[in-house]
Amino acid sequence: MPDFRYGPAVDLRSRRAASTRVVGTTALLSGLLISVLTISGDSGMTEPHFLAGLLVLTGIGLRLEAAITAPRA
C-alpha cells in the first residue's frame, strides 16, 4: 500500500535521494566554507584543512549516491 502522506507521486526512494542530496550539499558547502575561512587566516595548522577536505569528499560522495539511486522519470 503506498504512503500518501507526501502525495501519491512521491515514493520512498525519491524522498531518500532528495534528503541525501541535501545532506551532501550541506557537507560540501561546509567544507568549502571552512577552507575559505582557514586560508584567509592561515595559522599553519593542518587540522582545519583536513576537516574541510573530508567534508568536501563526503559531500561529493553523497551527491553521487543520490544521483545514482534517484528514480528516473
Image (tube, rainbow, N blue to C red):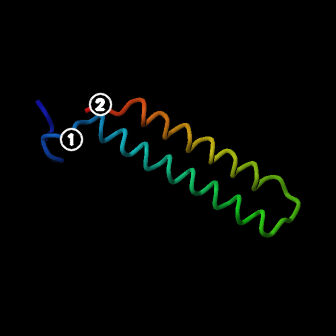
Number of callouts in the render? 2
Q: Nearer the viewer, residue 68 or 11?
A: 68
Left/right of residue 68 with respect to residue 58 in the rendered view: left
Image quadrant assignment for residue 32:
bottom right
The residue under the point 75% across, 56% down is: 48
SS state under label 2: loop
Q: Which residue is mark 1?
A: 10
- Crowding at dot 1, Cα within 10 Å, few <14 / some 14-19 / many 20+, comes out as few
Question: Which residue extends farthest bottom?
Answer: 41
N-terminal-most mark, 1 or 2: 1
Q: Nearer the viewer, mark 1 or mark 2?
A: 2
Determine whether label 1 and label 2 are within 8 Å by CB: no
Which amino acid lies under the numbered mark 2 shown in the image of this protein? Answer: Arg
SS state under label 1: loop
Which amino acid lies under the numbered mark 1 shown in the image of this protein? Answer: Val
Image quarter hosting the C terminus: top left
The residue under the point 71% across, 66% down is: 37
The residue under the point 85% across, 58% down is: 45
Residue 57's spot in the image, x, y percent? Answer: 63, 41
Above-or-below relation of 40 to 23: below
Residue 27's spot in the image, x, y percent? Answer: 55, 51
Left/right of residue 62 with respect to residue 17 in the rendered view: right
Residue 69's spot in the image, x, y percent? Answer: 38, 30
Q: Which residue is mark 2?
A: 72
Question: Which residue extends farthest front?
Answer: 73
